[in-house]
Amino acid sequence: MSEPILRITARVLPVSERGEVLLLCDQDPGHPGDLRWGTIGGAVDPGESLPEAGVREMFEETGVVVDAGALVGPVHQDRLEFSYDGTRYLGDSTFFAVPLARDVEVSFAHLEPAEVGNVLEARWWRPADVRDDGRLVSPDLPDIMELAIAAIERGSA
């Protein structure tokens, strides 16, 4: 079996004034119908900084424009193996938080072609509620959400 492909990503957790995090529901095209909640974000393009990639991904996946200076963190970093559409990856992910109004309009009009039909919904979640839902891209997602919420609350205190 071949080694997984290294994929460096920037991930963004928008935090509302209510202490909720905006997550995306998606599916792996290799496993249609297996829905899971995860963070906004994706691969860093050549020459991009992590914050620049996070801002770009935020726009592509939600239509929301944020300034790189508004990002807080990193609030978490990890390296996890995963599979997407039958390809094995080693994800090296850096997570940022950003304050965002809960009534922001989310649009999927700027998704990359491979994401169209696979990114299905955006919803505000509290960590305990998404943990209870159980459809998580990774089991530690609620813990990462709590780190992002705490980072934003510290910044506004």
Image (cartoon, rainbow, N blue to C red):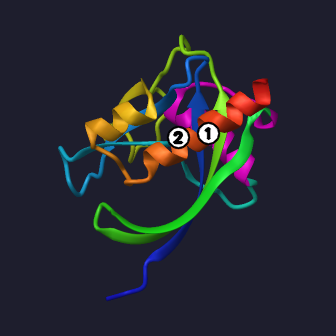
Left or right of 109, for residue 60: right
Q: Amino acid at mark 2?
A: Met
Spot the residue most to the bottom: 1
153 on left or right of 5 = right
Q: How many marks?
A: 2
Q: To which residue does mark 2 refer?
A: 145
* Res 147 quadrant in image: top right
Instruction: Give whichever of 38, 112 is nearer the camera.
Output: 38
Where in the figure is residue 22, as x and y percent of width and height? 49, 29
Q: Which residue is mark 1?
A: 148
Q: Dividing the image into 4 quarters, which one contains the C terminus?
A: top right
| Kind of residue at disc 1 | Ala
Residue 9 picture location, percent across and down:
58, 57
Q: Is residue 156 left or right of residue 85?
A: right
Residue span colored magenta:
50-69
Residue 124 in the image: x percent, y percent?
45, 24
How far apart, in angstroms, are the residues tagged by discs 2 and 1? 5 Å
